[in-house]
Structures are given as structure tokens and as C-alpha cells.
Amino acid sequence: MSRQIVVVDVESTGLDFALHVPVEIAWMNLTTGEWGCFVPHHTDLDLRTAEAKALEVNDYRERLAHLPRDKGQRLGELHEQLLGNTLAGSNPRFDSLMLRVAFTRQWLSPLEPWHHRLLDLSAYAAGVLGIPPSELPGLAAVCALLAVENTAPHTAMGDVEATAECFRRLEAKAVAS
């Protein structure tokens, strides 16, 4: 059986995986259609060390601060979804490092349950669309090139849905050519 592709997006308190933590995680399994979105456990100390700009971009205070924090069940479900499968995203390296932080905090092992090769939307789009590898496009640029609307940018689920649709359209183009 081939590996399933699981698109993941993580919104966090900042960009330093040694200091910051996830505050919203969304995922979608492109093979099964299963998906999830949740606020992982984080502490008040995590918020005190957060980058103000990060919380502004992901609109933490308005969208996420009042939501219940996952006690590990939904994170465990994502861990199982990723087991042996391909982690994909618009920035899968960052997301994988932030997931590692979340899995470590919940004592989930292995810390990196996914296949060792990550599926990066930018690299895939560059290959399919003939974009030079020195000019890898971000999610907004790929969405524009493929006429995909990201209805909720900088939210985990909005970015997952847009990324998933971009992967679907790119796969259709690759198969057609």
C-alpha cells in the first residue's frame, strides 16, 4: 500500500521551534478525506514568550484564546494519521518542527512518525508549473497561479484547505501532461 498524504499547517507563538509552541494545528488526509483542527495545549508562560507579531498574524487573541486546549487526544489522532505517511504542506519543514514540539510535550513517540521525505507545495508547484527552483513560490503565489482562493489565510484550517486544493490541482496538471 502506498503512503497517504497528510497536509498539515501549524500556527504558532513564533518562528523559533526551540522557544515557541503551536497554538493551532489543522490537517487533512488527501487519501481518506479525514481532517481535524484544534488548539493544542499551551501555557500562559508560552504566551508570555510569544512574538507579538506571530499572535497578530494568526489572530490568536480574537480567534483562539477562548477555545478549549486539547489535552492530547486530538494530537494523538494526528500522530496516528501521520504514522508512516507523507507529511505535506506549504512549509512542511517548519510544521514538522512545531509538531515535534507538540509531540514532545505530550510524550508521543516516535517524535517524527511520518515518512522521512516531506512533500513541499513550493517544490511540487515549481516542478509541475516549470518555475525555476531558485524562485520557489509561497502559498499565496501558488494559490494565485492555480486560481485557488484561500478563504482564511493565516489560520491553520484555511491554509490546509488551500494547500490541499493546490496539491489536487497540481496533481491533475501533472497527470494530464
Image (cartoon, rainbow, N blue to C red):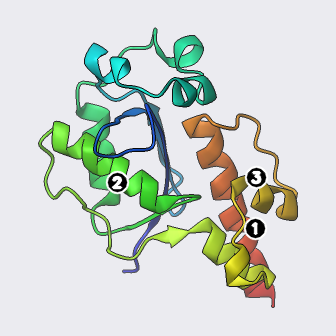
Q: How many numbered marks appear?
A: 3
Residue marked by disc 2: 97
Question: Does residue 152 appear left or right of residue 70 in this picture?
Answer: right
Tell me if I can see residue 171 in this picture: no
Q: Earlier in the sequence, mark 2 or mark 3?
A: 2
The residue tagged with tag 3: helix, strand or loop? helix
The residue tagged with tag 1: helix, strand or loop? helix
- Seen at 44% across and 61% down, the residue is 93
User: How packed is label 1: few (under 14 Cα within 10 Å), some, or many (20 or more)?
Assistant: some
Residue 122 picture location, percent across and down: 65, 69
Numbered badge on residue 169: 1
Residue 168 picture location, percent across and down: 69, 66
| Front-lying residue, 64 or 32 | 64
| Image quadrant where residue 127 sits | bottom right
The Cα atoms of the two marked residues, 2 and 3, are separated by: 22 Å
Which quarter of the figure is the N terminus placed in?
A: bottom left
Residue marked by disc 3: 140
User: How packed is label 3: few (under 14 Cα within 10 Å), some, or many (20 or more)?
Assistant: some
Which amino acid is tagged 2?
A: Leu
The Cα atoms of the two marked residues, 1 and 2, are separated by: 27 Å
The residue tagged with tag 2: helix, strand or loop? helix
Question: Does residue 132 appear left or right of residue 113 in this picture?
Answer: right
In the image, residue 99 above or below residue 130 = above
* Residue at the bottom extreme of this rendering: 177
Residue 97 picture location, percent across and down: 34, 54
In the image, residue 93 above or below residue 34 = below
Residue 163 picture location, percent across and down: 65, 55
Which quarter of the figure is the C terminus placed in?
A: bottom right
The Cα atoms of the two marked residues, 1 and 3, are separated by: 15 Å
